Image: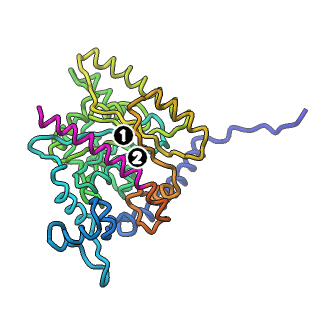
Amino acid sequence: MIKIKPLDAVVNLEVLTAVSARANQIVASVRANMLAPEARKIPPVFNSAQMAELMGLEKSAVLYQANKGDIPSGHRDGAIRREWSLVEARQAMRAFRKDTLRDPKKSAGVCITVANFKGGVGKTTTAVTLAQGLSRRGHKVLVVDCDPQGSMTTLFGVLPDTDVQEEQTILPLCAGETDSVMSAIRPTYWDGIDLIAAAPLLFNAEFLLPSRQKQERDFAFWRVLDSGLDEARAEYDVIIIDSPPSLGYITINALIAAQGIVMPLPPNALDFASSAQFWNLFTEVCGGLFQSRGDSKNFHFLDIVLSRVDRSDTVSEAVRQWIVAAYGANVLPIEIPKTSIAATASAEFGTIYDLPPSAAKSSTMKRARDAYDRLVEHIEHQIMSIWAGDISH
């Protein structure tokens, strides 16, 4: 018989505390270096070719409109090259696309929640990239980070552990200390996008909401965020919520507040099974809540977005067929590829829209950005359709 040395149970809470401290120290160090506003989180600039692509015009037409004064003229970088700041690019898009923008007198802002039961599927990246893409097209966007891990907050260059106070999150709303999110809003480095941040302290909402449900007569915990966003809907064209990778009180609030749901879903068997479990639990929970209160909820759209797609993976093709069979027309004809450029952006706490064209080969950059551009365009069309319904009624 092989003699095996017994393995003692030596990993106690003190050991785990030390491990946690070291890990947090490294994360804080990396974040501090990567996310210092003066060092990393700066808005992009656009050359004439990028402006032409953004506006869907020939480069000569962009320069013509700039010279006429129809759009901002940008500034010269050297004798020939002309560049536009993000602020100027958004001003140009708002002027050029004014017929596609929201009329605040007729329509409220549209709220979209990006959700998935499982982490690591591209949920936060999708939420932030969608916000940036809509902002690039001229819309005013509010992003709401409802995940206590603060991944969306981090991508906007804010450190959840040190730069976020309780009043800058939705926690006061959940605690009943305020009935609006407006006081929690802060600007970001990206023109046209404001942020309601998250931090680990937001975990407290998972205890506050059920406590209020027990103590307050007629309190509906699932409608707290929905009603708290009422003022914001008047100020912003689009509100994008990043939800936690779990089905708790916060996630239910995030989903009920939305008019549309976007679920990034890699063509992976475990991710697919997890998504089915997510909808099963959500419908069961909401069915019980609504039946007891006579409440209801309708969504304008549910978009399943195949994310992190590796075309060289033959197994994923079978899973893709399962996803289409399960979700039918809700599966978008848009796939977000798994690319090295996306990995580079993630490693630098950014997205594909944060990276300069020089960050990778143009073909790799174009493939990744084209997919997100198509996703943004598709969702923008859905948003405009909701506005059209508001106007017609």
Q: Residue at x 16, y 50 (%)?
A: 99
Residue occupied by mark 2: 124
Position of residue 31 measured from the top left corner of the image (x, y, whole percent): 45, 59
The majority secondary structure of the magenta stretch comes to: helix
| Residue in front for this viewpoint, 188 or 13 | 188
Q: Amino acid at mark 2?
A: Thr
Please state, as top left, top right, bottom left or bottom right, where the C terminus lies in the image.
top left
In the rendered view, would you say 369 is above or below 166? Answer: below
| Residue in front for this viewpoint, 152 or 365 | 365
Callout 1 secondary element: strand
Q: Residue at x 39, y 43 (%)?
A: 148
Q: Amino acid at mark 1?
A: Val
At label 2, counting other C-alpha atoms closer than 10 Å, the crowd grade (few under 14, some 14-19, many 20 or more) is many
Q: Which residues are magenta?
A: 369-393
Give the side of residue 251 with respect to residue 65, left or right. right
**Residue 377 shown in magenta:** yes
Please state, as top left, top right, bottom left or bottom right, where the N terminus lies in the image.
top right
What colour scheme has been applied to the protein in the rendered image? rainbow
Q: Residue at x 46, y 38 (%)?
A: 265
Position of residue 173 measured from the top left corner of the image (x, y, whole percent): 24, 38
Give the farthest residue toward the left: 105
Give the side of residue 333 with respect to residue 274, left or right. left
Q: Residue at x 41, y 35 (%)?
A: 331
Position of residue 183 measured from the top left corner of the image (x, y, whole percent): 20, 48
Q: Is residue 162 at all visible to an observer of this figure?
A: no
Q: Considering only order in the chain, which callout, 1 or 2, is on the residue closer to the N terminus?
A: 1
Specify the quadrant of the image occupied by residue 385: top left
Residue occupied by mark 1: 114
In the rendered view, would you say 230 is above or below 153? Answer: above
Give the side of residue 2 with respect to residue 201, left or right. right
